[in-house]
Image: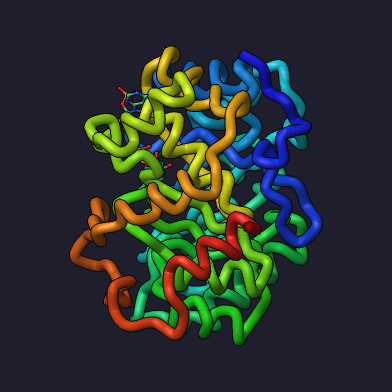
Amino acid sequence: MTLPSSDPAFYTVIQGERVPSLGLGTWQLRGAACRQAVEHALDLGYRHLDTAQMYENEDAVGQGLAHAPVDRDAVFLTTKIWHDSLAPADVRRTTEASLRRLGTDYVDLLLIHWPNPHIPLEQTLDAMLALQAEGKTRHIGVSNFPPSLLQRALAHTPLFGIQVEYHPYLGQHRLLRLALAHDLMLTAYSPIAKARVLEDPVLQEIAETHGKTPIQVTLRWLIQQRPVTAIPRSARPSHRAANLDVFDFALSAEEMRRIARLDRGLRLVDPDFAPDWEREDEPADEPAEAVLEAAIGS
Ligand SMILES: NC(=O)c1ccc[n+]([C@@H]2O[C@H](COP(=O)([O-])OP(=O)(O)OC[C@H]3O[C@@H](n4cnc5c(N)ncnc54)[C@H](OP(=O)(O)O)[C@@H]3O)[C@@H](O)[C@H]2O)c1
């Protein structure tokens, strides 16, 4: 497998910084399996890892990182604060505990995992900014924020990124537009719709044209959008390798549009504490197609 860093899709450039556009998701990976997955991924060439306090695997992620022959500062590491820990004192206490578990002095991106309407957002952000000022995180951001809540956060402080569910079956054009406007990274979680894209006839047809799989086409579709990074998760070495093998082909603008038309508002992660998602199929100020064109730069 070749990892051509000359492929513009290899990195996502956000606020002048290059972030590896493909990362390893680690939800539901724990213990030795998680440590080995991280170590193997870093060996393969992954340089972007996603964890969270709630995944109960930060220690294993940290061990994998420590064992891999890769410098800490060559890896973009994200963790997330759980939604019951967003009061300022809890932000500090739990983030410092995350750093101890991860075995590192800093993370690259610290996210609010889910919004909590009972804790003022601005207070949480101020506590995160204080940690950033102390060098405990390089950047801050949010996850699972609908557009209006993201705008509220941005009215308080600049952010580096937002992480949300994003795949061909769940369009995110409003958030994509905000990401483009504010130079934010949009990290796509559940990027392959938990492997459901494998059965898709359109993706299968495009995949066949390129000698790739529907999963590889989906990942390529995501990272060919300028502010987007994707964090597929796999417990299997062969799948981790396949998911990184997306840098030897490119999708045409027409293929990008065709995949975007698969959007059917399918949300796979929607716990009872989720915010009121502002539906992407409501009339918008701007058509989804126009945002996609801006994101792919055509
Ligand atoms: N911020 C949030 O609230 C949030 C929510 C959900 C997820 N996330 C993050 O996003 C990451 C990814 O999302 P996800 O774990 O929900 O789903 P996903 O990455 O869309 O799908 C994972 C599933 O796809 C399978 N898979 C992966 N690569 C494959 C391949 N090449 N061929 C066939 N099957 C493949 C995996 O099975 P195998 O293990 O058998 O390969 C697993 O069952 C998470 O791990 C987590 O880090 C964040």
Q: Ligand 1 shows up in which quadrant of the image? A: top left
Expressed as whole percent of the image width and height from the top left, the position of residue 169 reads 30, 52
| Residue at (24, 58) in percent of width and height | 264
Front position in the image: 279 or 232 = 279
Q: Residue furthest left?
A: 272
Residue 70 seen in the current view: yes
The quadrant of the rendering that contains the N terminus is top right
Front position in the image: 93 or 224 = 224
| Residue at (52, 52) in percent of width and height | 187
Expressed as whole percent of the image width and height from the top left, the position of residue 103 reads 63, 35
* Residue 84 found in image quarter: bottom left
On the rendered structure, is 43 left or right of 72?
Answer: left
Expressed as whole percent of the image width and height from the top left, the position of residue 133 reads 76, 66
Residue 252 vs 94, above or below: the answer is above
On the rendered structure, is 117 left or right of 45?
Answer: left
* Residue 93 found in image quarter: bottom right
* Residue 158 found in image quarter: bottom right
The quadrant of the rendering that contains the C terminus is bottom right
